[in-house]
Amino acid sequence: MTLRLPLDSKERFTEKTPYAPRPDNPYAISKAEADRVVRDFYKETGMFITISNCSNNYGPYQFPEKYVPLLVTNLIDGYKAPVHGDGRHVRDWIHTDDHARAVDLILQKGKPGETYLIGAENDRPNAYVAERIVYLSGKDASWIKYVPDRHSNDRRYAIDATKIIEDLGWKPEVSRDKFDDGLKETIGWYKKNEDWWRPLLQRRALISNGDNNVFAYMSLDREVGKTKLSFNPEETIAKDDRAKIVLTEKLLTEEN
């Protein structure tokens, strides 16, 4: 959505960071366009409108395909914890409770038309996150599995939350030095609430030609942490059509 941060830089996204001129996937395009529409609507109507952009969330009630719950639920079920690529991709993690408090504060005290970035300055390599979850789950490093990288997997996300901290008085309660505490709580929640997340793992999206002929099912491949396609063996799919479906799936698959 925004210009990319180099892996070895100390830069962070701010409210003034420009958007990438040509986002390379539909997900990023939709995010950038949504912000643009909101800003234009504010200029035209003057309504109370704010925008908040956050870093990667973790905590209870997160869909199990996302990175932290994927690793947690995999380990619960005896699957290994997949790490994409070289594991050095950096994400800035914020507990969902801190994110929710920030959004509530913006609604109460935010200035109309303003954008606020929300982050806990808890940027960590994905491999480190996997190592902590494996350790806190009572397992050893053999439970980590390196798998091929994802399409459009940006190397580094990091947010500068100075504006919301100074202007609105927000700060994260589950701070960087309490990351293990947040992960422990999250692991415990998923262990106690299997009846919530297990049905979600059974859900599948369908790809059809519009005439009730199912071409393929899209579902989560837990061993590699990616969306997978399962073609219907009863359907004959032309080679070109199959290639189009695979290409579409590749473009729509995003980093958790």
Image: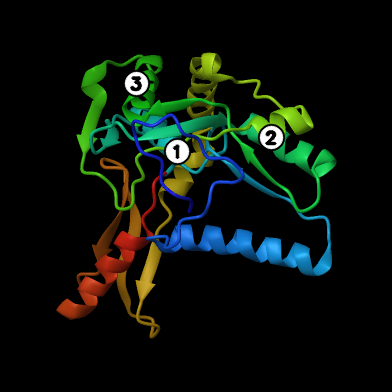
What residue lies at 28% left-to-right and 32% top-to-bottom? 87
Spatial CA distance of label 1 from label 2 is: 18 Å
Looking at marks 1 and 3 on the same chain, the residue that comes earlier in the sequence is marked by 3
Please name the residue that numbered disc 2 is placed on.
163
Quick one: 116 or 149, which is closer to the camera? 116
Question: Where does the image place residue 191, in percent across and percent down from the top left?
Answer: 48, 26
Q: Secondary structure at mark 3?
A: helix
Residue drawn at 39 percent across, 22 percent down: 133
Q: Which residue is denoted by mark 1 in the rendering?
A: 157
Work out how far the residue at label 2 is from the one at label 3, CA to CA, in angstroms: 35 Å
- Neighbor class of circle 3 (other Cα within 10 Å; few <14, some 14-19, many 20+) is many
The x, y position of residue 24, in whole percent, is 37, 60
Q: Which residue is mark 3?
A: 134
Residue at left offset 31%, top offset 16%: 139
Query: Residue drawn 53% across and 14% down?
Result: 177
Q: Is residue 111 left or right of residue 221?
A: right
